[in-house]
């Protein structure tokens, strides 16, 4: 129990100290499928020179930044009818997105190894981009993970950017994190959702 408290204290202290050394970038948090549709429009507010640090579906939204929304929805809709399982559908979606971008955005993709270490990766080409996107969206139990998994948890421990974008904490967003069968009405709800402070 004492070791757990020491580790917890170290994580809290590290996060507290990170608040003093923020870099000029935008962190896009995890959010599953509902988060992807939420982030996709919000990210368009940032220009091409912005540096993004992301994990999980937040990275897919960054990649989709310059792809037409209707086209992105069409890709997702066509894949959902293939009935190939979550992992294959996810990976095919990633291949389709990357094939439709001209330029890799300035992006640091966060993944996690099985020891809980957060790893920051900058893709140097489209092949590496696909590999990293697949790794950061590998959800344990839902996918056959190999050496690295979804970087979603790292978002809470590795957040050094001065701007952050997170999904709203409400029932509809949480309920639809893994919902691959959303209709257009649901997608538009997440895309147009505005946080009220």
Image (tube, helix red, strand yellow):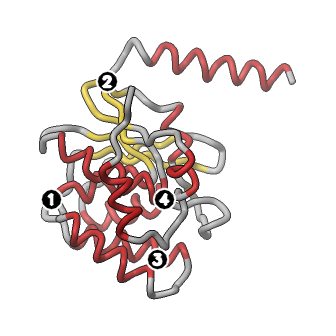
Disc 2 versus disc 1: nearer the observer: 2
Check disc 2 and report the residue beneath it.
162
What is the spatial separation of the Cα atoms under label 1 and label 3, in whole angstroms? 23 Å
Does label 4 or label 3 sit earlier along the sequence?
3
Badge 1 element: loop
Secondary element at image label 4: loop
Mark 1 or 3: in front is: 3
Q: Is residue 192 left or right of residue 115?
A: left
Question: Which badge, 2 or 4, comes first in the chain's sequence?
Answer: 4
Local crowd size for mark 3, using a 10 Å CA cut-off: few (<14), some (14–19), many (≥20): some
Q: Is residue 184 left or right of residue 139?
A: left
Instruction: Give the number of the mark in front: 4 or 3.
Output: 3
Towards the viewer: 128 or 13? 13
Residue at which label 4 appears? 137
Upstream in sequence: badge 1 or badge 3: 3
- Which residue is label 3 attached to? 89
């Amino acid at each position: 129990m004492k070791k757990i408290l020491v580790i917890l204290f170290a994580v809290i202290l590290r996060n507290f100290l990170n608040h003093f050394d923020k870099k000029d970038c935008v962190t896009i948090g995890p959010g599953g499928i509902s988060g992807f549709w939420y982030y996709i429009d919000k990210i368009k507010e940032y220009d091409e020179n912005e540096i993004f640090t992301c994990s999980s579906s937040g990275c897919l939204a960054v990649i989709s930044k310059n792809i037409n929304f209707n086209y992105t929805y069409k890709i997702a809709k066509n894949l959902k009818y293939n009935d190939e399982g979550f992992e294959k559908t996810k990976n095919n979606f990633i291949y389709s997105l990357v094939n439709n971008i001209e330029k890799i955005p300035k992006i640091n993709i966060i993944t996690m190894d099985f020891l809980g270490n957060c790893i920051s990766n900058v893709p140097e080409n489209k092949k590496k981009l696909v590999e990293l996107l697949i790794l950061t969206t590998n959800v344990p139990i839902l996918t056959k993970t190999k050496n690295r998994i979804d970087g979603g948890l790292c978002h809470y421990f590795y957040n050094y950017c001065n701007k952050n974008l997170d999904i709203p904490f409400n029932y509809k967003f949480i309920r639809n994190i893994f919902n691959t069968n959303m209709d257009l009405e649901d997608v538009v709800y997440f895309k147009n959702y505005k946080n009220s402070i």
